[in-house]
Image: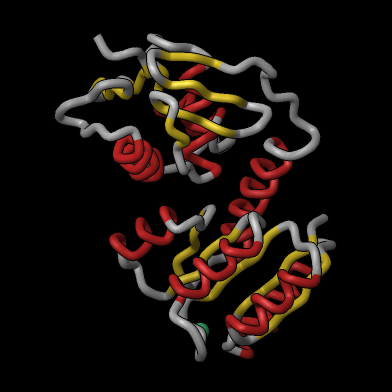
Amino acid sequence: MARVLVVEDDQFVRSALIRHLTDASHTVRSVGTALEALREVAHVGFDVVILDLGLPDLDGSEALKMLRGITDVPVIIATARDDEAEIVRLLNDGADDYLTKPFSVEHLSARMAAVLRRSRASGAGAEPPSRVMRVGGLSIDPLRRQAELDGAALDLTRREFDLLAFLAERPGVVVARKELLAEVWQQSYGDDQTIDVHLSWLRRKLGETAAKPRYLHTLRGVGVKLEPPR
Ligand code: CA
């Protein structure tokens, strides 16, 4: 049971979504423009936002950035374009997941459940380790959700932080992609691309590349590990 904001300008899609979500006992509000969505999230607490990318007033990525400027609420992007580059960019801009239209009710439910599980796990209910973890020049404070590299604060997204913290809890240990999906994304299925995207951005923020790794080491076909540079 979640509070859902549906941002969709297509009246037909919107009604279908509202009907389905209401049937599934969610509380639904819906708007047809990005600006209305911003107004809603500023005044009402939601558990998840389903954001259509083709809105009449703002470009989808603009809308997402503005949303992210005011709230951490999980956002599932709904797009008619199966444009990999754009989806990757939106995930990096703070989208939590995406759906390609047309999507089934089952698919939406599965994605929503996963996103809600993740956000609840990282919220009040979960007990993060309280100690500050150090790996080489990296320090990661799970309680304050802050990370530093050589004394300089890292500007990480929520997912990048979770990924880094998970790896920092087991330095030098190769973690399989499947385990990352299960533990960081709390998903039992999914594509490697999601992990690769977040890894590559995390890498960039750590000032390294896959070709010249310092902290983050990918072992092809096996997994990834975090360890201090030699
Ligand atoms: Ca639309």
Give percent across and percent down for residue 152: 43, 32
Q: Is residue 85 left or right of residue 115?
A: left
Please count the marks in the image: 0
Among the 4 quarters of the image, the one containing residue 76: bottom right
On the rendered image, what quadrant is the N terminus found in? bottom right
Point 64% across, 41% down: residue: 118
On the rendered image, what quadrant is the C terminus found in? top left
Q: Which residue in the rendered view is the most extreme toward the front?
A: 151
Point 79% across, 37% down: residue: 124
Give percent across and percent down for residue 51: 57, 71
By what rule are the colours in the image chosen?
secondary structure
Q: Is residue 51 left or right of residue 117?
A: left
Among the 4 quarters of the image, the one containing residue 13: bottom right
Depth check: 156 or 84 in front? Answer: 156
Point 54% across, 53% down: residue: 96
Give percent across and percent down for residue 79: 45, 71
Point 56% across, 28% down: residue: 183
